[in-house]
Amino acid sequence: MFEFILRRLLIAIPTILLISMFVFGMQKLLPGDPVLAMAGEERDPATIEMLREKYHLNDPIPQQYLYWITSAARGDLGISLRTQEPVTDLIGQKLPVTIQLAVMALIVALVIGIPAGVLSAYKKNTWIDWLSNIVALSGLSIPNFWLGIMLILLVSVRLGWLPASGYVSPWEDPLRSFQTMLMPAVVLGTGLAAALMRHTRSAMLGVLKSDYVRTARAKGLSERVVLIKHALRNALVPVVTVATLIFGELLGGAVLTEQIFTIPGFGKLVVDAVFSRDYAVVQGIVLCTAIAFIAMNLLADIAYRLLNPRMRNQ
C-alpha cells in the first residue's frame, strides 16, 4: 500500500505543474491590468512602476512563473492585489467554511442517494423503482439557485425554522452554525444525491446478476445480508469514484449556493477575485482546488483496495 501511495504522489507532481502552467498562462491572457486599478484614479507613473517592480510584473513571463511556483512550493502564494493580505491567509479563512458545507452536503447526498439506489435496483421495474427514478431526474433537473430561493421563502420567511442567510463558525456556536449551513447543504446534497442514486442503481443492477450473489442466496443467506455484505460492498467501487469527484467539486466552491445564502466560502472569494482581476488569489485558489482533486482521487484509489480484496492482491 505504501508503494502504491508513493507512486500516485510521484504522478501527482507533474500533474500539478502542468495545471499551474496552464492557470498562470491563461491569467496572462485575460484583458485588463490590475496595476492600473491598484494605482488609483490619478495613476501616477512612478506609482505604477513601483507596483510593477514590487509584484515582478516587469520580468519575463517564464521568470514570473518560476518565481510564483517556487514561492508556492514554500507555502507562499503571494499577496492579494486587492486587499494586500497574504493569499494563504485568505484561503485559510475561507477553506474551513467550504469544507464544512461540502461535508454536510456530501452526508446528505450519501444518506439519500445510496439507500435509494439500492432500493431502486432491488425493486426493479416496480413503482418504487419508477418513483426513485422520477425523483432522481427531478433532483438533477432543478437548478440549485431556484431550490435555494424556494427553501428560503418556505423554511425561513414563512415558517421561520432556519435563518435565511449568513454564517456562524462552529467554534463560536455549534448549533447556530448547523442551522445556518443546513439549507445550503440540503440544496447541494439533493442534486448530488440524485447523481449518486443513478450510479448506485446501475452498479447494483450489474452486481445482483453476478454468480457470487446467486451463490450467497443459494446458501440460504437472508436478503439483507446478501444486499449489504455481498452486493453493496462490490457496487460501491464505482460509487466511491463519483463521491470523491463530487467532494472535490464542492471544495472548488459552490458559487451560486454560497452567493444565495451569503456564505463566505471559496465560491464568493473566487468570484470577487475574478471581477477585481486579483491574479494571485485566483491562481492560489485554482492550485489548491487542483491539489484537492488529486487528493480525492488518491483517497478513492485507497478506498478501492479496502473495498475490493482482489485489487489489494494485485
Image (cartoon, grey):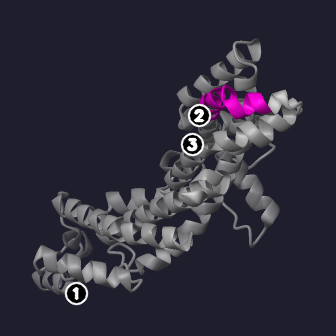
Q: Name the amino acid, label 1.
A: Lys
Q: Position of residue 261 (x, y in %)?
A: 60, 49
Q: What span is colored magenta in the figure?
A: 198-215
Q: Quadrant of the N terminus?
A: bottom right
311 and 104: which one is in front? 311
- C-beta proximity under 8 Å, tags 2 and 3: yes
Answer with left or right where residue 263 lies relative to residue 219.
left
Q: Is residue 302 above or below residue 144?
A: below
Q: Name the amino acid, label 3.
A: Pro
Q: Position of residue 209 (x, y in %)?
A: 66, 25
Residue depicted at x 42% and y 80%: 85
183 and 141: which one is in front? 141
Q: Position of residue 56 (x, y in %)?
A: 19, 83
- C-beta proximity under 8 Å, tags 2 and 1: no
Of pointers 2 and 3, the one earlier in the residue sequence = 2
Query: Distance from label 3 to label 1 (Cα)?
Result: 49 Å
The residue carrying pointer 3 sits among few (fewer than 14), some (14 to 19) or many (20 or more) residues within 10 Å by Cα, namely some
Label 3 sits on residue? 238
Answer with left or right where residue 302 lies relative to residue 109.
left
Of pointers 2 and 1, the one earlier in the residue sequence = 1
The magenta stretch spans residue 162: no
Classified by dominant secondary structure, the portion drawn in magenta counts as helix
Element assignment for label 1: helix
Element assignment for label 3: helix
The residue carrying pointer 2 sits among few (fewer than 14), some (14 to 19) or many (20 or more) residues within 10 Å by Cα, namely many
Q: Name the amino acid, label 2.
A: His
Label 2 sits on residue? 199
Residue depicted at x 36% and y 82%: 73
Q: Quadrant of the C terminus?
A: bottom right
Label 1 sits on residue? 54
